[in-house]
Image (tube, helix red, strand yellow):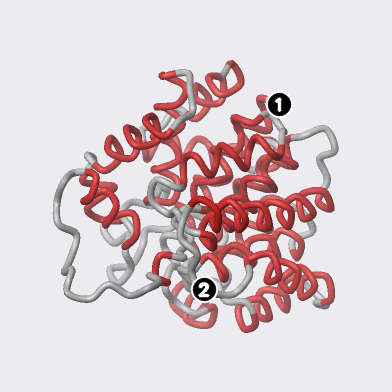
Amino acid sequence: MYKKILGCLAGAAAGDAMGAATETRTRKQIAELFGGYVTDFLAPPADTFARGSRAGQVTDDFSVAYVTLQEIVNRKRIDEETAVAALLKWAAVPEYFDRFAGPTTRARVLELQGKKAGSDEFVPVNDNNKATNGAAMKAAPIALLSRGDVDAAIDQAVTVCRITHNNNIALSGAAAIAAATAAAIGKNDNLFDVVRASLYGAKKGDEIGRKTGATLAGASVETRIRWAVSIAVEAKDLSTAIDEIADYIGSGLMAVEAVPAAIGLCVAAGGHTVDGICAAVNIGNDTDTVATMVGGILGALNGIDSMPERYLEMIEKENQFDLKGLAKSILEF
């Protein structure tokens, strides 16, 4: 279990750091700029959100989960108060919040701080722009607290994620990733159960979001996961799957793209951790978020030994993280 927990943390962080360099580009543009398929940590170019970061440094995708987990294990509880405290603690770090906070998270933090987030002149009936992947990006590490209980993982992810993304689509995405990760560290840890759990989580998250949060207009995360997995299964090879998932599903900021793409890439990579992370890093668009989710799920499924030792060393060194210590704290939670 320790190796699986550490694998999830390292895989999610590595995916975030590697994807930070390729974000917003198409797959072709990534290959042109970096001279081919990216398989290592690189310093983000000047035209990316992570510009100025060193190779191996993470963005908001993993850092918010790291700070949240620290707060949870320190307080020894998972509740709304802890989630809010963790979010504000993360937002107090300029290197994280000022540079990387997404639109939905930023607006919520400003609201919690008592600051005006924008104009009130026009308020649409549904703020569909909030159906983003900012909830799902942190769901895999949070699911580690469940110790393999899928329903518990869904509840815990919702508790943490509804603070910023309290709507059916975003919570559907978060629950899908959380459920997949819980299945990955559970007793029946195989790729089929991971996919099946992701579908169950997507459905449950959507139901919870509709009952307790906002119902937004948008596609079904559950249906798109089924589509992404079918593409992955039918593709002749991983490269084809990457292209087709990018074309048909997308890999952008919205949860209905990034989450299904992540599950599809897990399948396309045959469940192999490094292959899955690299596929997400090279698919284009919101690569750091997709790679964070893929790395978290497959790192949990296969454990820390499924990645090169330098992944963990690089992440801990460049971010001043103690992933091994956090993994032990989660195990004892």
Residue 3: image quadrant is top right
- Residue visible at 61% across and 33% down in the picture: 144
- Residue visible at 73% across and 57% down in the picture: 199
Question: Which secondary structure, mark 2?
Answer: loop
Report which residue position mark 1 lands on.
Answer: 1
Is any atom of residue 35 visible in this view? Answer: no
Q: Residue 28: image x %, image y %?
A: 53, 82
Q: CA distance from mark 1 to mark 2?
A: 32 Å
Is any atom of residue 67 visible in this view? Answer: yes
Type of amino acid at the residue the image marks with label 2: Gly
Question: Which secondary structure, mark 1?
Answer: loop
- Residue visible at 52% across and 48% down in the picture: 14
Q: Residue 243: image x %, image y %?
A: 65, 80
Crowding at dot 2, Cα within 10 Å, few <14 / some 14-19 / many 20+, comes out as many
Asked if residue 102 is positioned above or below residue 283 in the image, the reply reads above
Report which residue position mark 2 lands on.
Answer: 284
Of badges 1 and 2, the one in the foreground is 1
Residue 230: image quadrant is bottom right
The number of numbered badges drawn on the structure is: 2
